[in-house]
Amino acid sequence: MANTQPLRIKTISDYHRVMGLPKPEHPLVSVINLETISPPPGNKPKSLVFDFYSISLKRNFDAKIKYGQQQYDFDEGIMFFISPGQVFGIEVGGNSILKRSGWLLLVHPDFLWNTPLAKTIKQYEYFDYSVHEALFLSDKEETMIITTMQNIAQEYHSNIDRFSQNVIIAQLELLLTYAERFYNRQFITRKIANHSVLDRLEDLLTSYFNSDGLGMKGLPTVQYIAETLNVSPNYLSALLKALTGQSTQQHIHDKLIEKAKERLSTTTLSVSEIAYELGFEHSQSFSKLFKSKTNFSPLEFRQSFN
């Protein structure tokens, strides 16, 4: 798959044509029952990229989805979100008995033009989550999502008038808000997996700040932390916010301040030397961060031990 150019599907009409569906009733919005889509013959992996938003709720999805070098099975009912320009791969499974079901909502960015949602949709971070960070829904939650998608379809099935776009936008905003709420619930209810991430984060930061050559490596970035933990940066920060009230960056800073306090109270190193040890190029930046976190300058903190 990596050696072939991804198939780029630019419009929702093109998607309908590629999937053997009738022309969409609305050129910029489409709600599709997945039972109406027949998988392409064979199970040769395919790489795709859409120029529109894709929101899917899938059950009995006998396929493997691949992002980057990671591959995941999805045999349960799940929901995931793809923004325009994201490349993803799909390999259809060989289970001919299993019948796929679910719903797919496609929204072209042009439909959002000149509406507040055109900007705010970028604030929904789950469009940047990896596939293995998909949303797992309860039966009640699934019903709410399906009902909202069907309301969107019902609106464009009706005679389109000057209110139609506003009604569809309102339903889409409702769906996105539901998804945000359900993700927050998932962060809390999937405690074993999520607290495992917390434990690994703590171990990673401890190891990083105790390692030699920290001054050469510099402070760990959110991107580095997320890649090491095998999660996307946005998912990690959202998870940490839900569980601890703090972002990934705040966790990095907390571990940094913890290490700085240790060095200030147990060594005679200068503030500049400690700042360099902890990965800062300039001691002023270190002192400013330290004071913002502790209400003391590094020297004031050290003097409190004398």
Image (cartoon, rainbow, N blue to C red):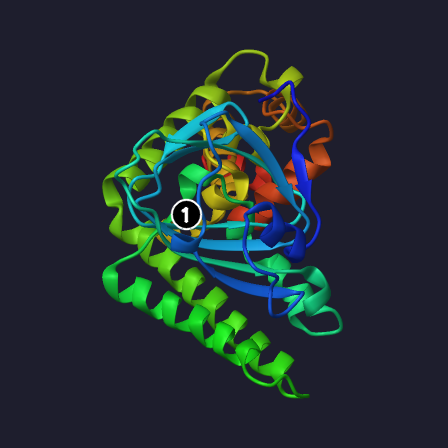
**What's the residue at 49%, 37% (across, down)?**
40
Relative height, residue 113 to residue 219 (above, below):
below
Position of 306 with respect to 190 (left or right) is: right
Secondary structure under tag 1 reads helix
Q: Is residue 5 above or below residue 23?
A: above
Toward the viewer: 232 or 205? Answer: 232
Q: Residues within 10 Å of mark 1 (few under 14, many from 20)?
A: many
Looking at the rendered structure, the kind of residue marked 1 is Leu
Rendered location of residue 225, percent (x, y) = 51, 30
**Quadrant that contains the N terminus:** top right
The residue tagged 1 is 239
Q: Is residue 295 visible?
A: no
Q: Is residue 59 visible?
A: yes
Closer-to-camera residue (147/268): 147
| Residue 47 location, quadrant | top right
The location of residue 260, given as percent across then percent down, is 52, 31
